[in-house]
Image (cartoon, grey):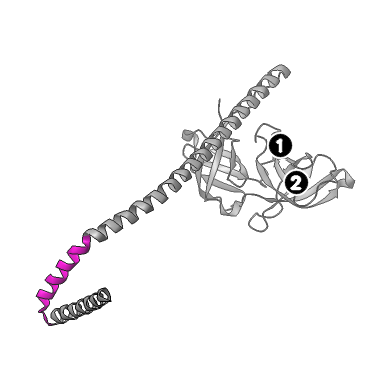
Amino acid sequence: MIAADVLKRLHYWVLGLVLVLTLVLLNLPPSAAGRLKTAIAALFIPLFGLTGSAQSFVDRASYAPLTRSTLIRELERVQAENRQLQISQAQARQALDENARLRALLGWQPRATWTLRAAHVVGREPTTWWRNVTVDFGARDGARVGQPVLTSAGLVGRIREVAPMYSSVALIGDPECGVSVLIQETRDQGLIQEARTAPSGDGMVLLKTLQHSPATMAGQTVVTSGLGGVFPPGIPVGQIVDSRSVDGGLFTEARVRLAANLNRLEEVWILIQLP
């Protein structure tokens, strides 16, 4: 009973002290009140700092293993990709070596090595602007008549004339740019003939196969065949739009939409055969 009375009185004393301090703070000048608040806050800073440090330690302790495990997983992924690339490179090297050995056994000439040189389209001929363009790649840069010209989309044409600083390029569809091609899906071979309309209209050229090819159909891919030695094999040319039988069924003629837009040429690549 006595202890309860003491606790009750203590409670009242504490409540009274808080009220007195509150009244004092309210009646103090602003400068004095600010100094008093600062002093009181300084008493609790160590406690707040200890709490903040403990929380920061907990955060770091919980975050560090996650970061480390993530980095380890990422490192393992990169190492696995690197090993796979090394294996693929080794397999490709073995395939090239095997191809070279087989070609040597058969007495075939080794495949030519090609490199790309960039050039800008700087002009079009005013009379036949859609069949010829001029590029800033001339004899001093290593330009030679007949070198293939292409974009990232596909074949553009070949160099027709060479000057010291510039070259004229005959585009696909020009009479001076015949292209030996094959249909990738059927392996039927043919020739790209002179275009009947300017590529600015529909971007079409004519493909005439060397024999009647009933399997030729829309959507099939046309690439260079490598025959003739001007264009290396496998360069994309375009896609077949439609086809028909001609010359009494002896040949198949197909319209091909070119992969490269010849009307919007700005930068091209010159394909140069290395010695």
Residue 225's tag is: 1
Residue 250 spot, x, y in % from top left: 87, 43
Query: What SS does tag 1 mark?
Result: loop
On-image quarter of the N terminus: bottom left
Range of residues picked out in magenta: 27-45
Label 1 Cα crowd, 10 Å radius (few <14 / some 14-19 / many 20+)? many
Q: Are marks 2 and 1 in contact (CB under 8 Å)?
A: no
- Residue 94 picture location, percent across and down: 63, 24
Residue positioned 66% across, 59% down in the render: 201
Residue 244 place in picture, x, y as percent: 83, 51
| Side of 141 where 17 appears, left or right | left
Which disc, if any, is residue 207? 2
Asked if residue 164 lies in the magenta stretch, the reply is no
Q: Is residue 34 magenta?
A: yes
Q: What count of labels does the image hold?
A: 2
**Location of residue 61 with respect to 91 vertically, above or below:** below
Residue 150 lies in what quarter of the image? top right
Question: What residue is rendered at 43% in x and 46% in y?
Answer: 65
Image quadrant where residue 24 sits: bottom left
Q: Is residue 12 above or below residue 144?
A: below
Q: Earlier in the sequence, mark 2 or mark 1?
A: 2
Q: Main secondary structure of the magenta part?
A: helix
